[in-house]
Amino acid sequence: MLSPDVIHFFKNASFSIVTTLDVRGGLHNSCKGIVKVKPNGDIYLLDLYKRQTFKNLQHNSKMSVTGVDEHKFTGYSLKGEGRIAEASELGSDIIAAWEAKITSRITQRVINSIQGKKGHPAHPEALLPKPEYLIVMKTKQVVELTPTHLK
């Protein structure tokens, strides 16, 4: 079970760092979007390109999902076991969550552009392909990254 604080933190994260292990046990880090966080510890992550993270999970299910909030000086690392879930396995709630996340990111990018904040000249989220699969991680351990003296 994930605490309400952890769920809230990752629901509001714009991205996370996912770590997997390659066939030789080497670490691989990649930025992934969080689609949904369930209280039971299931984390749904977007992975669009079937490259290294996808290959690594086919050989070794161990992974972690890490997020930090630099402004609040807090963060969490969730450790667990991941699997590939084909789009056909996913419920309509997960697909709707992905679409809502992309819409929100595009909207925020447009607002930032209007406010004069520099960013990517295009809207990369609008060019993303529709997901063929998601990564589903079952959380086994939560590590709080906030220094003890700042809690």
Image (cartoon, rainbow, N blue to C red):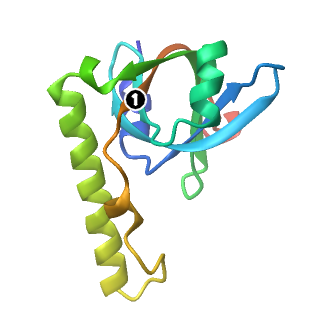
Q: Is residue 114 left or right of residue 5?
A: left
Q: Residue at x 57, y 15 (%)?
A: 80
Camera-side residue: 13 or 28? 28
Q: Residue at x 68, y 39 (%)?
A: 29
Q: Which amino acid, mark 1? A: Leu
Quadrant of res 2:
top left
Q: Residue at x 29, y 48 (%)?
A: 101
Quadrant of res 68:
top right
Q: Quadrant of the N terminus?
A: top left
Q: Residue at x 37, y 46 (%)?
A: 12
Q: How many marks?
A: 1
Q: Residues within 10 Å of mark 1 (few under 14, many from 20)?
A: many
* Residue corresponding to mark 1: 134
Residue 147: image x %, image y %? 69, 38
Above or below residue 44? Residue 100 is below
Residue 15: image x %, image y %? 48, 47
Above or below residue 142? Residue 127 is below
Residue 118: image x %, image y %? 48, 83
The residue sitting at the bottom extreme is 116
Above or below residue 69? Residue 75 is above
Camera-side residue: 58 or 74? 58
Whether residue 144 is visible here, answered yes or no, is: yes
